[in-house]
Image: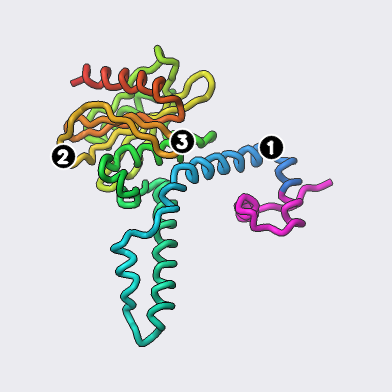
Amino acid sequence: MSTPTVIETDLHAYLDDQLPDARRTDIEAYLAAHPHEAARLRDYQKQERALRELFNPVMTEPPPEALRQRAMKPPHPEQAHPAALSRWSLQRIAAGIFLTVVSGAAGWLAHGQYQSSDRLAVLTPLPHHAAVAHAVFSADVKRPVEISAEHEDQLVTWLSKRMGSPMRPPKLGPLGYELVGGRLLPGDNGPVAQFMYQDANGQRLTLYVSAEIKANQDTAFRYTQEGQVNVFYWVDGKWGYAISANTPKSALSLVATSVYDQLERKH
């Protein structure tokens, strides 16, 4: 029995639950015959769940008051009833916020203005951006990094050149984590480096290094939780560092301390 013809858009529609029952049956038969494709879709589902857990608190917030006030001022009053237009404008604002957040999670990183006001009072965008990058790439099975640990020298040379400073990954073997590799990410105003590690159980953590710090802040450890992601972060001069993982706070603090100590010895 031949399996049905399936294209990429069919698979995405299947994930989004947008197929009729008959076509869903075809896709399920295809996935049963192609386990590697089934595994790829499970990876996408893991990423989606991680992003939803991370952004659900943000998505349930009402639009900022400034945007609500602006939405109440129709640009062309003669073309629509103000009440109807304001409702339409608010819907566009909500859709715009959603698309901006999701696009940020996909690689451009969500901007700090979409955090809740209480978070903005105590956090820089650093831990939020680090948690988003962790949620996106740690769930990727096939290509979690751009350059693997097998080519660490190439990784170090590449990231150091792009970041304008030596970017050698700390050694976390004594804590049970081995380097997977790293990648370059786009920040708001320049490149960001991300190193990924993994333990024997497949648990991953990431080190996020950014040079976008605008003010020299204290270097004390700070901790926050973004969705299911725990983050320890600190600032040293113009550099910001964040360790992110889904591991308990106590275990992650040991890793953060080790990374901090190793970086300090390099100065």
Quadrant position of the C terminus in the picture: top left
Q: Residue at x 47, y 34 (%)?
A: 138
Q: Which SS class for mark 1? A: helix
Q: Is residue 129 magenta?
A: no
* x and y percentages locating residue 74 in the rendered image: 33, 77
* x and y percentages locating residue 46 in the rendered image: 55, 39
Residue type at mark 2 is Ala
Q: Quadrant of residue 247?
A: top left
Of circles 2 and 1, the one toward us is: 2
Q: Earlier in the sequence, mark 2 or mark 1?
A: 1
* x and y percentages locating residue 102 in the rendered image: 44, 51
Indicate whether 190 appears above or below 236: below
Q: CA distance from mark 1 to mark 3?
A: 29 Å
Q: Earlier in the sequence, mark 1 or mark 3?
A: 1
Q: Which mark, residue 228?
A: 3
Q: Residue at x 40, y 41 (%)?
A: 132
* x and y percentages locating residue 167 in the rendered image: 28, 28
Residue identified by numbered label 1: 35
Indicate whether 132 appears above or below 197: below
| Residue range (magenta) | 1-27
Q: Residue at x 49, y 46 (%)?
A: 52
Asked if residue 234 lies left or right of residue 143, the reply is left
Residue type at mark 1 is Pro
Q: CA distance from mark 2 to mark 3?
A: 29 Å
